[in-house]
Image (tube, helix red, strand yellow):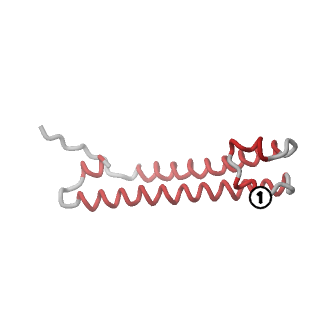
Amino acid sequence: MIATQGTSKELDLASKTAILLFFQTVGGAFLIAAAQTSFLHTMLKEMREMAPQVSQSQLVQTGATEIRQVFDENVIPFVIRTYMEGLKVAFALVIAATGVAFTVSLGTRWSRLKMNN
């Protein structure tokens, strides 16, 4: 935000700030949706392979803090393992997006911000 405002002409300031805020908001919304979808997809796929007797709807509706109260003791290790696999995929997606953002940032113009005294 500071770099955008510091390197913009006064005439372009409003539109550049609006574009920046738009992409920050929409990008965050898409990334959260993609991470949540990949988490759920991976978790459900792994659970079908490890313990097919576990209800998928119950798995989705149960929060991480309620696992030990909702599921039987014999399937709790499988549930925890599937949560961890889902988290790995979601974190990998976020790390990849961060890498893309960093790579794109290397292409920006370097300039000194003007200081008014």
Q: For the point 27% across and 46% down, which residue is it?
A: 111
Quadrant of the rendered structure where residue 24 is?
Answer: bottom left
Placement of 61 over or under 72, stated as above or below: below
Callout 1 secondary element: helix
The x, y position of residue 10, in whole percent, is 18, 56
Q: What count of labels does the image hold?
A: 1
Residue drawn where x is 81% and y is 42% of the image: 77
Q: Label 1: few (<14), some or many (≥20) within 10 Å?
A: some
Relative horizontal placement of residue 114, taking residue 50 as reference (left or right): left
The C terminus lies in quadrant: top left
Above or below, comparing residue 22 to residue 75 in the picture: below
**Residue at the extreme left of the image, as rendered:** 117
Write down the residue under mark 1: 56
Frontmost residue, 52 versus 63? 63
Q: Is residue 63 left or right of residue 50?
A: left
Q: Where's residue 61, x and y in %?
A: 70, 54
Residue 11 vs residue 88: left or right? Answer: left
Location of residue 34 in the rendering, given as x and y in whole percent from the top left corner: 58, 59
Amino acid type at mark 1: Gln
Q: Nearer the viewer, residue 102 or 61?
A: 61
Q: Which residue occupies the extreme top position in the image?
A: 117
Residue at horizontal 36%, vertical 56%?
21
Percent coordinates x, y for residue 58 in the rendering: 75, 55
Q: Residue at x 56, y 47 (%)?
A: 95
